[in-house]
Image (cartoon, grey):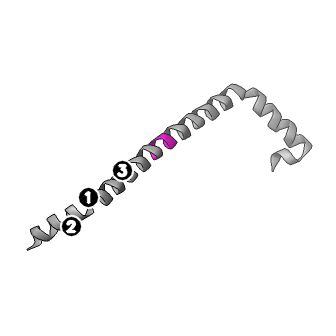
């Protein structure tokens, strides 16, 4: 690893200082992207949970309807 030796540590620090604004921007974008993905996953999970509750409420009605359709 570059940062484990004294020359590499100095080189790494120079690169970080030189590119600080870019690194912060990339990090911020990454955090925003992850937050967006988390929201999308939450919406999907909520939808699945709603569908499961609907099915549980309507299982017998659905079973009856399907039985009549298959006769």
Tell which of 9 and 54 is nearer to you.
54
Q: For the magenta stretch, what is the residue range? A: 37-41
Q: Position of residue 38 (x, y in %)?
A: 51, 43
Q: Earlier in the sequence, mark 1 or mark 3?
A: 3
> Looking at the image, which residue is at 41% across and 47% down?
46
Q: Position of residue 60 (x, y in %)?
A: 24, 64
Side of 55 relative to 6 (left or right): left
The residues tagged by marks 2 and 1 sit, at their Cα atoms, a distance apart of 8 Å
Side of 44 relative to 23 (left or right): left
The residues tagged by marks 1 and 3 sit, at their Cα atoms, a distance apart of 12 Å
Residue, disc 1: 58
Q: Are marks 3 and 2 in contact (CB under 8 Å)?
A: no
> Looking at the image, which residue is at 68% across and 25% down?
21
Side of 24 relative to 42 (left or right): right
In the rendered image, residue 61 lying in the magenta stretch gets the answer: no
Outermost residue, left side: 71
Say few, some or many: other residues with alpha carbon within 10 Å of mark 3 (under 14 / 14 to 19 / 20 or more). few
Residue, disc 3: 50
Tell which of 49 and 3 is nearer to you.
49
Say few, some or many: other residues with alpha carbon within 10 Å of mark 2 (under 14 / 14 to 19 / 20 or more). few
Q: Secondary structure at mark 1?
A: helix
The mark tally for this picture is: 3
Residue, disc 2: 63
Which mark is in front, 1 or 3? 1
Q: Earlier in the sequence, mark 2 or mark 1?
A: 1
Q: Secondary structure at mark 2?
A: helix
Q: Secondary structure at mark 3?
A: helix
The residues tagged by marks 3 and 2 sit, at their Cα atoms, a distance apart of 19 Å
> Looking at the image, which residue is at 35% across and 55% down?
53
């Amino acid at each position: 690893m570059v940062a484990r030796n004294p020359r590499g540590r100095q080189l790494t620090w120079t690169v970080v200082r030189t590119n600080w604004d870019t690194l912060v921007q990339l990090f911020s974008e990454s955090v925003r992207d992850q937050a967006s993905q988390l929201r999308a996953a939450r919406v999907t999970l909520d939808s699945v949970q709603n569908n499961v509750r609907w099915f549980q409420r309507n299982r017998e009605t659905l079973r009856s309807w399907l039985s009549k359709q298959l006769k």
